[in-house]
Image (cartoon, rainbow, N blue to C red):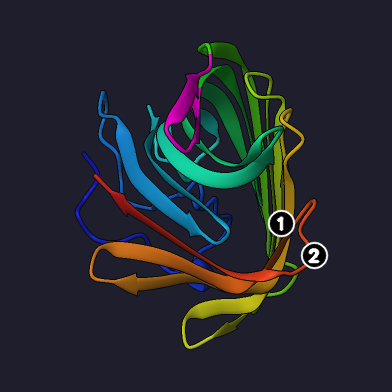
Amino acid sequence: MSSQRPAPKLARRGPVLATLLSGLVGSTSPVGAGEIDTLLFGSLDAGSDTFLTVGAKAGLTSLEQDGFAALASVGGGRRTERGPDGPRARYTVAAAALAGYQWFFDWGAVAAFAGPETAREMLIAGPQFDALPTRYGLRLHGEVWARPTEATLLQASAVAGSARDSLWARLAWGYRLWETYLGPEAALYADGSGYAKWSLGLHGTDFALGRYNFRASAGLQSERGRGRACPYLTLSVWSPL
């Protein structure tokens, strides 16, 4: 198994692939023959809606080398919305098991994953509730991590799923200060229920506490059908197993 030390800082290594909100992180720890390099991750998104995700990424070789990898995650959340009879809450549980490949270059890394996903939702309006049927579909997940210069980081992510006809995308830029990348980020999400949100904020990526690495984001978030923006906060953590 890989050693228990935390993944090195992005600025101290060459090509890198990092796992953040259901994503990808590399570690330079050596992996012995027949061993699996495994990384655990989790994220919490809190704003007008709330969603918690936990998962793991595993590779037969080091997660900082070209090769195949598997990505599994499960999550759940709650959001408020307006239904035909007034306000209601939508509770969602979703899971996915993906397989894919990652490529490393002098300038950064690219990863692509695909696999099945499932989702179950429940609508609650006062004393009434409606459990929607379990849905199954295909999820596609892609990430690009690039270092335009030694002190900057550019990251783009996109996740599309057919179980809820959903799309999530994020674009972030960072400048290295105090061993952490700091900069702006923008994200959007939409699904087949007609719900959509977009956000703009600031992030701090790859700061370490012991063996754990973190990303924290904060900013303003807007939703379709709501006139006022509200604050949001995102916290992601990852660590080698």
| Crowd tier of the residue under label 2, counting other residues whose Cα lies within 10 Å: few below 14, some 14–19, many 20 or above | few
Residue drawn at x 71%, y 56% is: 187
From the top left corner, tell me how far across and down residue 23 is, in percent: 52, 44
Chain-order first, disc 1 or disc 2: 1
- Which amino acid lies under the numbered mark 1 shown in the image of this protein? Ala
Main SS of the magenta segment? strand
Depicted 217 relative to depicted 126: above or below:
below
**Are the two marked residues, 1 and 2, in contact with CB atoms closer than 8 angstroms?**
no
Image mark for residue 150:
none
Q: Callout 1 environment at 10 Å: few (<14), some (14 to 19), or many (20+)?
A: some
Magenta residues? 121-132
Residue identifier under label 1 = 187
| Residue 180 image position (x, y, % from top left) | 50, 78
* Residue 217: percent from left, percent from top: 55, 70
SS state under label 1: strand
Residue appearing at x 54%, y 50% in the figure: 17
Q: Residue at x 72, y 25 (%)?
A: 165
Closest to the camera, between mark 1 and mark 2, is 2
Nearest to the observer: residue 10 or residue 77: 77
* Residue 83: image location, x then y, percent: 67, 36
Q: CA distance from mark 1 to mark 2?
A: 18 Å
Q: Which mark is residue 227?
A: 2
